[in-house]
Every structure is written in structure tokens, then in C-alpha cells.
Image: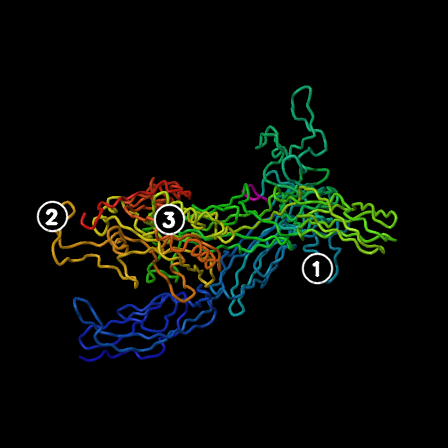
Amino acid sequence: MPQPTWITPAGSLGTIPEGVFYQVAVEATAGADDVFYRVIAGELPDGVQVSDTGVVEGVPRNTVSVQGVPREVPGDVTSRFAVRAYTRKIVNSQYVVDRLADRTFEITVSGQDVPEFVTPAGSIGTYYDGTRASIQIEFTDGDLEDTVRVQLASGELPPGLTLSSTGLISGIILPLSAPPSNQPPGFDATPKDVYPKDFTLASESRNFQFTLEITDGKDSNLRTFEIFVWSKKTMTADNTNITSDNTFITSDTTNLWLPILLNEPGFLGTFKADNFFAYKFDAIDFNDDEVEFEISTGAGSGFDSAFVPGPQFIVNPGENPPIYSTRDPATDAFNGGPDSFDQDDVPFDRGTFSLPPGLTLDPETGWFYGYIPAQGATDSTYRFAIRVRKKFQPTYVSDFAYFTIRITGNIDTEVIWLTEPDLGTINNGAISLLRVQAVNTGGRDLQYRLVSGSASQLPQGLTLQPSGNITGRVSFNTFALDGGTTYFDRDIRTRSITQETTFDSRYQFTVNAYAAVSEQISYEVVGIVLTNSGSGYVSTPTVTISAPPPTVDAVQATTGAVTLTGGAITAIAIGNPGQGYSSTPTVTITGGGGSGATALAVIREIQQTNSVSVFRTFTVTVARTFNEPYENLYIQCMPPEDDRAIIDQLVQNQDIIPTDLVYRQDDPNFGVSQRVTYTHAYGLTAAALPDYVASLDLNHYWKDLVLGPIRTAQARDANGNILYEVVYSQIVDDLVNNQGESVGKEVELPYPVATLDDSSLTTTVYPNSLINMRDQVIDTVGQISPALPLWMTSKQADGRVLGFTPAWVIAYVNPGQSARVAYNIRTRFGTNLNIIDFEVDRYIIDRSQTHNWDPDTEQWIPQPPAATIFDQNTTIFDGSATEFVTPADRWIATNEFDKYLVFPKRTILG
């Protein structure tokens, strides 16, 4: 039979645009036999594939991979690949390749994307003049590397508005100028038209039309927009241009402009405490009325803690006698009045506003000023609101503009965050290795907590410890549609993009790193006691007191007057007692012409008032890798009392396992083991108990294990860095040889033997090596994921990867410390661990993550409503209620839900 012969010539299959469906067939012939095709080398354009019928198809996309992340490129990209054409034949009931021929092709994908407007053409806003406007022109460009600029191509913007290169139209719309009121029409006889339509004496309403251009430097697009500006001056009763069908102008609109705060809202900046501060708020009133500034902070402070002095308002019209009040009806809705929304009489309690200590606002000038006192190594952000009103017409008031200001102590030099804000991605069901960490260069120990009252959320099952360790195990029960059985564009042939749609859960939380005040105990010097007065002093000697440790608020003590009597030192006074000493400082006496004088400092304990307190917001993403939970199977040693004492001597002796060497000692998943356990199988299907019981029929009976030699291993991250090390005792199985090979799972005897109860004879036995036992459970119950611990899957110092290792992990220790701990154990215990009675008669199923899972229905209990409806008049999730995590699996360190499985046989024969 002939080899396949290519019909399609080698080389280019053409240049195609990205983002457009492409299809072409490559063809070969092999006589009457069917020809099949597959790519055997090279790389197809992203989004394109070759089917086994020879069709090259897909929606091409120009991307390159940067650290594993695909990114679009703006130029042409040529992909070269080899396609094999082959015939098939049947061998042993399976298809295999018979004859073949290979050919190389290439496809060039044009990567340039023209930037496109998203904001539709036409009107993008209607405003009064004398008001602030902010309009973002939206656009898109598929080439992420391109820089797109927006610019004015023709027309004009309303006066006062500017266009940024990013497409933001913003500013204060200035009233359209009219000639000075003391000039007659036609006064402007100069060649230059200074005022539009200078025959009118009032500002005008006007529609502004302009064309914007977006360009990436290679291609561009144009679009025309409009902004209509109503003149406040025309808002009078005799206006004939405004009709009753106008939906923008309301009947209460006046021809007076509201005052405008000129300062852009937002962040004022970061400033040091223990400093003077001044910042000016500016405002404009187009009626040239006097204005005053008001600041709102929180309940009981700011402008709204007392009523604005002004005219007397009658609060009981129609009654006698009248009751007068200085409460301004314009702000009554915010001040706990009878018609306000907050009836608790707490003025303006709409938000958690506050001012830095020491600062105040001058209502006449707008100066925000004062002296910010020292606050230690703290980092505080304050939020407040500013508005401006006409001084003599206080009902004309601007909207609130919100500002924040950050006040720090010696943060930049004293506290450094070691953890980046993005903690990365963790799989559902995974044990957390996450941690947040900062360091205080002044030497104070830091603790960590979630910011009280914040909207901080950790993934379900994780807890932030005071040490900064984020401990626990992420719940398996994360967001999914129909239990994870509904997929979106998973098939590359039916989607127009190259990446599959995912529903990742992103969590954000704010951490406060702080040094607790209760730990800020230090000493000051309160006196100097002479232990030897010395002799021969003819002038005042120099007396110095050594400095305290260089902490954030340490102060070196100084001496005062030195008293000399007859050439001897008889007294030394204290000048500044200092602070921050952790032990008694040294007193040094030099000079003065004498010698022999010595002295000791007397110290006393003081309470430091300053503390360290800084904040950082972190994010972590949970990836739903598993649509159903898995569980582990472990074996626990339950030895007699004498053997338990040996174990306690090992794990509780800090001379053998020093606390400062332990990795994540506050995490029950790490630290030092408190009992002898061996995880026998990982990632098992969360099966019903009868399925587990069925797995015990073969290869399971009582067994003696031996705690073998002390070994060490390393756990590394994706970059090869050592995260932690383990010290473990390898479990010795007498049915496995030194090469790790097990006796057979099923052994035929040369002669029949009687079962234990003599009820029958058998020639087949099932040895209970650990490997056989594990294989039998996995074969019967099933395994979702091997889910081995990181140290078993990491490359070790000798380049090996251990793989599954039967072991009792004695301790998890910090990098570089396992050899020391292993040496301590070997030196103290030798082979004593071998004598521990480790008899196995049962399994324990770890059901900490699966006790809310029903293995029969494969659903969480309770089940969320089954309805997931799209585009049927309404979009409904879970039966008209949006419930993404049900129930809430809160992680706790407990074996409350674990189940015991006792082996039904005592020996291999029953």
C-alpha cells in the first residue's frame, strides 16, 4: 500500500486577521484508505487547532506567554508547525498508526487591533453652567501593549472643561461670558470677537459639539459627541425657550449658581505626625457672593455638631406662641430632626469620618491647619467631607466632597511590609501556607489582626493568627453553577476567545500589624548611686549614661549637676531620665583630673504610650479545582502507657525540638506532632461507609508496624525556594523489601490451608502490605486526587523526588533546621522508637471537610435550590436567591467528624 501523499503544498497557509474565524483544509491522499491528521511539532496560533480530518480552524489571537500568562502582541506573529498525515490499522482490537507522511506549514496572524469607541456617539450629558462635570469616554484596544491617546479633533468643549489623554472630560463649566453690564450692545468693535453674540447682556444656553480621535499611533478612530449646557441666568419665569416637556429642568430651579469647591476630591497625601500642617480649600461663587466652608467628620464633631447661626426659623407655623430655632431647615434632614432619616438625634452620622488630631478648618478662609501631635510608629487614615455655602443664603450649598489624609509616625523607617498585597491563588480543599509579615526595625514584636469593622473576607475555612500565619484548609464548597456540571465555552472549537470562562473567587481583607501596648514596657533612669567617690578631681568630670536599644521612641538618659567635695565626687544628679531601656545602662565617668570614681544607674519600669500600628490590604483568589470534596485515610498509633511516655519525652522536650525552630507552630496542620499518626491514603473519594467497609474484605487484617529511621525532607515552592523541612520516622513494613517492592496483592499457596475457624480450605491469600492495603482501598473507593504533601512532591537536596512515603512526621521545622533536630532525636533516642508497640487494627477517615457532603446524592447538605435560570424574563440564581456557598464550612481543628473502620480479620486467614 502506498504511503500518504500530500496534496496541499508545504509553506504558508496565508496571513489572517486575529479575532476572525478562520478555516482551511490541508489534504493528503493514500489511495482508497482514509487519511487522518495531527500536529506533531511546532506551535499553532493561539486559538487555532487541527482536527483529525485535516481542518485548520479557530479564532486566531496574537499572544505571547510572559511568565506563563498569555498577553496580546500588536504585531504580526508567524507560527510554524508540522502536520502528520497517516492511515490506521487495527492491532489487538486497537487502532495504531500504519503509514505516514509529514509536512510543515506556517500561518501568519496580523496582530494590529484598531482602537474602538465604546461610548456611543451623540449626547453624553446635560449640565447647568457653573457646575462640575466628569465624563469618561470609554474605548477599547485588543493590543494590551499599545498606548491609546484621546485628543480633540474638531469642535470645542464647554469652557472650563478639559480633555485628558485617557479620555476624561472634567472641570467646572464656566458661565458663558456676557459683555460687562455697563457697556451698550455693539461696544466690542475690535476685529477679535471677545464675547459670543455681544448684542446680549445675559449668558446663554448652548449645545457644544465636538469630535474626538482615539489613536494607538498606528490606527485611529473618530466619533462626534455633544454636551448641552443650560445657562443659570436664563432660569427665570419669563423664559420662553423652556417648555413643559423638559425633563432636565425642574420647577424649583433658580437663576442663582451654587458655590463650587475648587479642590478635587480624593487623597490629600501622606504627612508625618509631630509636625505643623496647612492646606487651603478654595471655592468660587459665580454670583460673587461671600462663602463659608464647613467640614463634616463624625457624630458630635464638625459643622453638624451645632446648628449654624443665622436667622430665626419658626418651627411651629400657625401656632401661638411661635417657637423659634436656629436649626437650618436645609440641613435638618441630616441632623436628627423630626423629618430626618436619622431619628436618633446624632448629627450627621452617615459615615465613619474623623479628623487628624490637632487640625481645624477656618470657615472664612478655607485654611485647614494645625499641629499634628506625635503618635508613635502608627499609620492612620482619616476621612472627612467638605462643602461650601453662600454665607448669607445658607440654603445654597454645594454637595459634599470627600477627602482622605494619611498621617504616619516613623513608618517609612520603622515598619516594612515583607508580604506583597497579592497572596496569589489557592485551590479549594488545599491546606494554607499563606502568611502576612512585616518587620519593625526598632525591634518590637508585631502581631496581626483583621481590621475591626472592615469588610475583610478570608476564604471559607481560613483564619488569620496573631503570628501572621493564615491557617486552615479552604472549603471545597465554593461558587459553582449546578454543582460544577455547567461549563462555559470549554470546547475551543465553539468559542471565539482562547481562554475558558472561569468563576474565580477573589477575597480581599485588611490586616493591622501592631505592637500591643501591653508589650511596650521599658525602663527609665531615676538615679545614680556612687559605688566609689574617687579622688583628685579638680574640675567637673564628664558623666555619660549608655544609650538604650534603638527602638522607635528610645531616648538616651543624661546627667545633671555633679557635686565635688575635697576632690571626690559626692553626688551625681539626673537630667533627662530617658526611656526605652531594657536593662540597667552603664555609667561612665571621665576627665576632671581625678580617677577611681564609679557609679551605678538606678532604673524603674515605665509604660510606653506609643505603639506601632500599620495597615495593608491583601487579596487571595480561590480556584475551584475540585467539584466534590476528597478525604484522607490515616492510621493512629495507640500504644500502651510506657510507650506513650517515650513519645511525650520526644515531642514535648524543647531541648530536642526548640520552639524557635518550629515551622508554623500555631498551625495544627504543621508544628510538632502530638501523636503518632501515619496518613495511609490521600485524596480519596468521599464515599459512604459501606464502600469503605467493602474495601476491607481483602488485604486487611491486624498488622504490626515499626517506627524506622529518622529522616529529613524539604518542601519547595514553584521557584525552588525551601518553604519548610520535615523530620520524620519512616514506617517500616515487613512485607516490603528495601527496594520498596511489595509482596503480591494475591498469593497462590502450593497447598490448601484451613481458614481460622476451620470452616473451609483456601489456596489463595491476600497479604496486608501497606501498598496492598492502600491499593485495595483506592480500587474500591476511588481517588479524586493524590493530593500528596508538598515535601513528598518537592525536589530534595540530592535531586530526588520522594513521592508517596509512609511516615510519621515528627515536626515541621524552618528551612535549614531539620538536620539539627534529627541529630537531637538520634542522639537522645537512638533506636528506642523501634520498640514502640504500633499495632494496626483500624483506619480513621478524616472527614473534617466532608461531613456536610452526601456521597449518595453527591450534594452538599443542605442542598441549595436547584434552579439556575438564564434569560427567561429574569436571571435567577439558585431559585431566586443568590447563594454561592451553602453551607458555611468553618474550619476548626477537630477530629469530631472522623470515622473509625475496624479491620474484620485478625490474621490473613480470618
Q: In this view of the protein, which residue sits in the foreground, 185 or 163?
A: 163
- Give the color scheme: rainbow, by chain, secondary structure or one colour: rainbow
Name which residue type carries label 1.
Asp
Which residues make up the magenta segment?
A: 242-248
Q: In the rendered structure, which disc, 3 or 1, sits on the residue that comes first in sequence? A: 1
Name which residue type carries label 2.
Ser
Residue 92 versus residue 610 in the image, above or below:
below
Nearer the observer: mark 2 or 1; the answer is: 2
276 drawn magenta:
no
Q: Is disc 3 in contact with disc 1, using a CB cutoff of under 8 Å?
A: no
Q: Which residue is mark 1?
A: 193
Q: Is disc 3 in contact with disc 2, using a CB cutoff of under 8 Å?
A: no
Q: Disc number at residue 676?
A: 3
Picture coordinates of residue 520, whole percent (x, y) = 63, 44
Q: Answer with left or right where residue 871 lies relative to residue 565.
A: left
Q: Residue at 19%, 77% (x, y): give it.
A: 31
Q: Which residue is mark 2?
A: 760
Picture coordinates of residue 642, whole percent (x, y) = 37, 44
Name the element at disc 3.
loop
Name which residue type carries label 3.
Val
Quadrant of residue 355 in the image?
Answer: top right
Q: In the rendered structure, which disc, 2 or 1, sits on the residue that comes first in sequence? A: 1
